[in-house]
Amino acid sequence: VTGNLLGTTSIVSVNGVANFTDLSVKSAGTGYMLIFSTPNVIPAISNAFNVIGPPLEVTRQPIGSTGGMALAVQPQVLASNPSANLYAELIDSNNRSAVFFGQSSLVANASGYHTFTNLVVNLAGNYTWRFRLSSINTSSSVFTVSVGPAAALAIGQQPS
C-alpha cells in the first residue's frame, strides 16, 4: 500500500516478531498488498486484499455562497449501493427554517457518485447537509451562506 496506509508503519520487533496493531488503509480499492521490510532481510509480502469503502461518504464537501445563489462548490456523495435514491436534508445550526432549492434526491452514476448541482440556500447562516440512503446517514462539513447584496430599499420612517 503506497500513500494510503495510516497508523504506525515502523516499529521495533520483540523476540523477532513485529506486531502492527493500528494499521488501516485510507482509500477503498482492490489488490492492495503490504510489503514488510528491514535492512539486510528479504521483504515479506502479504496476500492481495480489498478494502471496501464506507457505505456512504461525502467525497466533495460543499462550500457556501451568498444567500439565494448556488453553492460555490456542490456536494458529491459516494454510495456503496448506487441504485438507491440518495436524499439530502439541510440542517441549520440555529434551527431556523431555511429553504434550499435544487435536487433533494438523486440516483448515482455508474460509479456510485451522487453529484448535486445548483443547490441554493436562501438564508445566511452555518449549515450542514445530511445525506440519507435507506437507513444510512452521513453529514457534510459545515459551510457558510453569507448575506447577499441589497435587493430593495425601504424607508423606515417617512419625513413629517
Image (cartoon, rainbow, N blue to C red):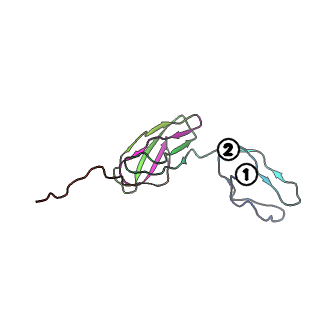
Indicate the position of residue 73 as horizontal and vertical percent values. 49, 47
The type of residue carrying mark 1 is Thr
Indicate the position of residue 85 as horizontal and vertical percent values. 49, 36
Indicate the position of residue 3 as horizontal and vertical percent values. 70, 53
Residue occupying the point 50% across, 46% down:
75
Q: Which residues are magenta?
A: 110-138
SS for dot 2: strand
CA distance for labels 1 and 2: 12 Å
Residue occupying the point 54% across, 34% down:
83
**Are the residues tagged 1 and 2 within 8 Å (C-beta)?**
no
The type of residue carrying mark 2 is Gly
Residue occupying the point 54% across, 47% down:
60
Mark 1 vs mark 2, foreground winner is 1
SS for dot 1: loop
Q: Which residue is mark 2?
A: 29
Look at the image and say whether residue 3 sits in the magenta stretch. no
Q: Residues within 10 Å of mark 1 (few under 14, many from 20)?
A: few
Q: Which residue is mark 1?
A: 2
Q: Residue furthest left?
A: 160
Front residue of 35/22: it is 35
The quarter of the picture where the C terminus appears is bottom left
Look at the image and say whether residue 129 sits in the magenta stretch. yes
Indicate the position of residue 29 as horizontal and vertical percent values. 67, 44
Asked where in the image residue 126 lies, by quadrant, the reply is bottom left
Q: Residue furthest front?
A: 159
